Image (cartoon, helix red, strand yellow):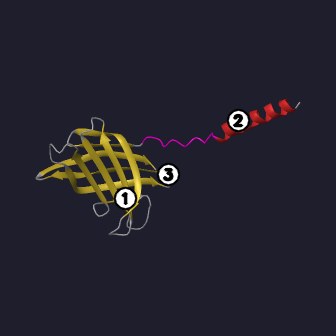
Amino acid sequence: MRLKIFVWAVVAIIAGAGLAGCSKKKEVTPEGSFTFRLGGVTYHSNSTQGYISDTVVAGKKTLVIDGVTNNFTKHMELMITFPNGLQAGQYDQGAGEMTLMDIQQKEDGYITKAISIKLESINSKQAEGTFSGTLISGEIEKPLTDGTFKVYF
């Protein structure tokens, strides 16, 4: 009888330890998207991330949409610095910035000359919008069209 109680106690301890070792599954963050067309070439991010940071100089929130093309040759980044807090709306050159850089630095990158961003929605979990404008690289100007993004935090 004593041996039976001892065996059941050992089984209970092992089962309890096994259950205690189980952890909750973490929520998987969905993949984001980030695409645009620059002068006839379509760029699509293979690895898109979005995050909100505080700017030290301006003391304002900035949404950063960051990506790398699927062949890992280009780095794409779109930033929106919010003048009046995180909110959906239309943002222009004063609040938005876009870059397209060659990761291997074999060619010059492109930076914003003019940009228009329509942030359709933003909350604590995601942001979504469209954008267009003009990017420059030295003396070369190219139209940026068909820009879309959807990022998850």
Give the SS element for disc 2: helix
Quickly name the residue at label 1: 90
Q: Indicate which disc residue 14 carries.
A: 2
Q: Is residue 94 left or right of residue 122?
A: left
In the image, residue 69 lies in the stretch drawn in magenta = no
**Amino acid at dot 2:** Ile
Q: Is residue 96 above or below residue 76?
A: below
* Residue 128 in the image, given as x and y percentages of width and height: 42, 49
Instruction: Please give the name of the residue rendered at 86% of the width and 33% of the height, measured from the top-left corner.
Output: 2
* Residue 41 in the image, given as x and y percentages of width and height: 22, 38
* Occupied quadrant, residue 48: top left
Q: Nearer the viewer, residue 52 or 133?
A: 52
Q: Indicate which disc residue 125 carries.
A: 3
**Amino acid at dot 3:** Lys
Pointer 3: residues within 10 angstroms few (<14), some, or many (20+)?
few
Nearer to us of marks 2 and 1 is: 2
**Amino acid at dot 1:** Gln
Residues under numbered marks 3 and 2 in contact, where contact means CB atoms less than 8 Å apart? no
